[in-house]
Amino acid sequence: MSWILPPSASSFAERIDFIYYLILVITGIAFVVVEAGLIWFMIKYRARPGRKAQYTHGNAKAEVIWTAVPAVTVVVIGVLSGAVWKDVKGRNSVPPNAITYGVTAQQFEWHFAYAGPDAQLGTADDFSVRNQLHVPVNRPVELRMSSEDVIHSFFVNAFRVKQDIVPGMETVVWFEATETGDFQIACAELCGLGHYRMGATVTVHSQEDYGRWLDEQMTTTALR
Amino acid sequence: MRRLMATSVFLVLACGGGEGGDGGGGGAAASVAPLGNGTISGVVNFSGSVPANPTIDMGEEPECVEKHGGSPIDPVVVVNDGKLANAFIRVVGGLPAGPYPMPAAPATLNQDGCLYQPRVVGVMVGQTLEIQNSDPLLHNIKAVPTENRGFNISQPREGMSTSRTFTTPEIMVPMECNVHGWMNAYVGVVEHPYFARSGEGGTFTIAGLPAGTYQLEAWHETLGTQTGEATIGPDGTATVEFTFSS
Amino acid sequence: MATAAVPLDEATHAGSHEISFIRKYIFSTDHKIIGIQFMLMSLIFLLVGGILAAMIRWQLGFPNTSMPGGGILPETMAPGGILLPEFYNSLVTMHGTIMVFFAIMPLLVGVYGNYLIPLKLGAPDMAFPRLNMASFWVAVPAGILMMAGFFVEGGHAAAGWTVYAPLSADPEWTGVSTGQQLWLLSLAVLGLSSILGATNYITTVVNMRAPGMTWFRMPLSIWALFVTSILVLLAIPILSGAAIMLFFDQTIGTHFFDALDGGQPLLWQHLFWYFGHPEVYILILPAMGFVSDIIANASRKPIFGYHSMVYAIIAIGFLGWVVWGHHMFQSGMNPTLGTTFMISTLFIAVPSAIKTFNWMGTMWRGNIRFHVPMLHATAFVAMFVIGGLSGVFMASNTFDIYIHDTYFIVAHIHYVLFGGSLFAIFGAITFWYPKMFGRMMNPFWGKVHFVLTFIFFNLAFFPMHSLGVAGHMRRIYDPTQYEFLQPLQPVNTFISISVFLLVLSQLPFALNFILSWFNGAKAPDNPWDDNGLEWSVPSPPPHGNFKETPTVYRGAYEFSSPLVEEDFLPQNKKLDSDPEPAQAAGH
């Protein structure tokens, strides 16, 4: 049982996590106030012989307060969330220097397409790797995703990234990994009987390692 | 077509909605006596240059890679000494009218090392196809027929076995695993038991036939079909040869 | 406003007739019998849904082990007692479907819409009694169709209760065809039942209120059922239409939702959630209404801020139509819409807060009697607060990126639908049971049931928040397949055990319900000292309800009024100071 988010490894994760902790604090206060109040009232105003309840139909001032306070609070949450949303998922949020990869999801596999030697995705020299996404660290990465069959969802816990992949549409998502290592990709939208096993790995390389990996792949692909 | 086939609800309800796809079919044929004791034996040749089989990136399934000892190959076209394996041969003409005897044993399709064993399997209509999992991981088996009712089942654990039958002759019913996109098998559903798969050496035999002249067809997943003819004489044997080329 | 234009003579006259058993108890047009019929049906479905939940939790808590008793399931579901992934998906789908459509919704609307509206408004029956009978007898075949799906080839629907297309649209992706089609047909048929019911409830509330029962004297339970009925009438046809479209995709080769043939998968989501979010409020508003009645009764105080409670119900009902996009933040929908829907969604917090604080305000300086209904009503407030606050996390489109489709949403919906709606239903059942069956439920076993349910509910669902915070996806057959989920497995096991105990904790309730029917103490007319009109008639009320049409002089919450000695003042009790209400001209 923990309210702490797991370690993050992407550039915008901290901003998303901040929204979480902000809401956690606000709702935590509301939670304590209401539940403590309830318990207090339950004990204090329990029925006792000879007592009569106070005959009152309400209090306009109190009601205005507990209408206005939540209203203002949600506006604040909304404004702060909206700003992060715009930068993470907004229409033009993908940084211009992002490397683009193709993602094809199908029951129950991921195929990640890499630009070949011409560094252009969508050309004949592209190559594709099953269930393995390799990206460089500290560099924005754009995924152009499509599905062969049903709706899937690209989810990397550590990057705080999730995006549904809808057949017939190209959905785009981006992230920038800030730590090297292997991270798990999971499908987050029920996609059939193998859904629970539709996992993959994203390997974040240092810049040099990434270049080496890419070269290696291009040679083996060329050999084929 | 598949959608049109997809049942009237009330029909199914009226039938008491049986479970599974099992049972049904060839029960009546099981007691039929063999039609004869003649045998057709043959060989499937391959001429020309053998196309290279693709390698499979099985890295995500170490348990399977282990079974192959090195980089696994997808055995699409298997040729040994000019003989072609995994061709599916069946009698297509010359048979007396049915009913035909049901093969005694069920056919099996095993998932082993993230590949189907065998890649090509024949069943008679109503004969049980036993699908087995010898891998310690999830496979799903999706049958994508055009004439029969499709199914999509899973076997998440090693040692599982599921039985299915087919109701209509169909050459061939593709089987696929969606967890491992490279896995493909083909099930030939035939109305009689006179079919065979060519082995590693390209040979096959079809037994239990009365004397007579038979037309045969050989099918291969990428090389198409070939036809042949064989006549079983008084000695009860016949031979036939097919030749596929790239 | 015209009130009580009912030919009363005819109604009471009917009561004196000898009616055959079948007309009286099976094909009855009496709203009270129909309410009880809905109750028995939906309680059975509640049990079924609970058993499905326990099976789901077995797999999650103890993956790849043989489920006790699982051996009786056929090979296509659980060979060797170990659940198959495709069957697990069916379980997940059917647990949600049955609980939402066949348990909670009929319990709230079918049971209490039927039972309470005429009684609380002083009417002899519904406006359209035969339509009312039809609404139940249409729901029965819907239930049979839904259960039939478990027995057909290919298994039951397995695309989730939200049946997202194209997974649900094409048997190729699941192997399920007949099961999904039965599911769709069943819901289309059930939709008809709901529409018939809603038409009736709305008409009855508008036209059949007793003299003096002005809009703002109506109990909040009736207000909630009234607004709910409007939501049902407007929302259900959308689901029915979408279900029929999907049925055509499945059967006759249309491609509304199939992208590969020019359809649009997101269209399904828009249609489903345009129905689905009002549906969420259909599932909570009546609960809020019942709880308001119970809390005021138990606190012996007028409801705090009656008018704002009414406006909050209306506001929630309205907001329900403009927030559906929050289910689709990560769906590939235009991200700009995401912000719009976030703002509208967050504003639901406002009427919800009004209601919560007004309930607390009602208890404040009260003289609270902790009868069993009040225990459940208090639990409703306490749990609804958790469900409401956890909703804020998901309303934020930004944080929803992370917790969308995780156990956080599972926790949230269960805090709202179980912690909220179901506790309110237990409150309502125990509160109105004496009226419905003429017997008292055993209070001791009622308290045992409450305490056990409250404890195990929280042990089962509170830890799910932490699973969600750790990124645990929902609808996962075997979480141990993911390395990052493996450390969470002890939590899963803990939750599973709690769920089993939670299911077992319903045993005292079931026994209490059944045994009290036969052996409970005879219920007086007004066991809770309440003000509602239903308590002014015998328990159970006779056919036709009221000997003569009651006249209403005040609202339903005049508890501890200084005008009278007792701490309650029934709505129809005439004091010397009360003027006669203006009679409807045409009466």
Image (cartoon, rainbow, N blue to C red):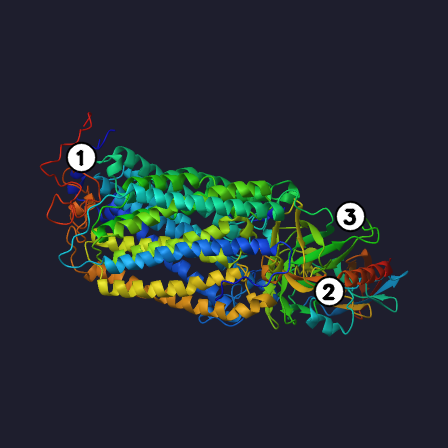
Q: Are marks 3 and 2 on the same chain?
A: no
The residue type indicated by label 3 comes to: Gly
Location of the N terminus of chain C (image quadrant): top left
Q: Which mark is residue C8?
A: 1
Is residue B160 rendered to the left or right of residue C395?
right
Local packing at callout 1 (Cα closer than 10 Å; few below 14, some 14-19, many 20+) is some
> Element type at marker 3?
loop
Q: Which residue is mark 2?
A: B119
Inspect the image, locate mark 1, and give the three-letter code of the amino acid beneath it.
Leu
Q: Chain of mark 2?
A: B
Residue A170 horizontal/vertical position (percent): 67, 45
Side of C57 where B37 appears, left or right: right
Where residue C132 appears, x then y in whole percent? 31, 41
Rendering coords of residue B204 (x, y %): 78, 68
Q: CA distance from mark 3 to mark 2?
A: 34 Å
Q: Is residue C246 above or below residue A156?
A: above
Give me the disc on residue A122. Answer: 3
Residue C489 or residue C198, whichever sits in front:
C489
Residue B110: quarter of image: bottom right
**Other residues around mark 2 within 10 Å, as few (<14) / some (14–19) / many (≥20):** many
Which disc number belongs to residue B20?
A: none
Q: Which corner quadrant holds the C terminus of chain C?
A: top left
- Same chain under badges 1 and 3? The reply is no
Q: Is residue C557 left or right of residue A7?
A: left
Element at badge 1?
helix
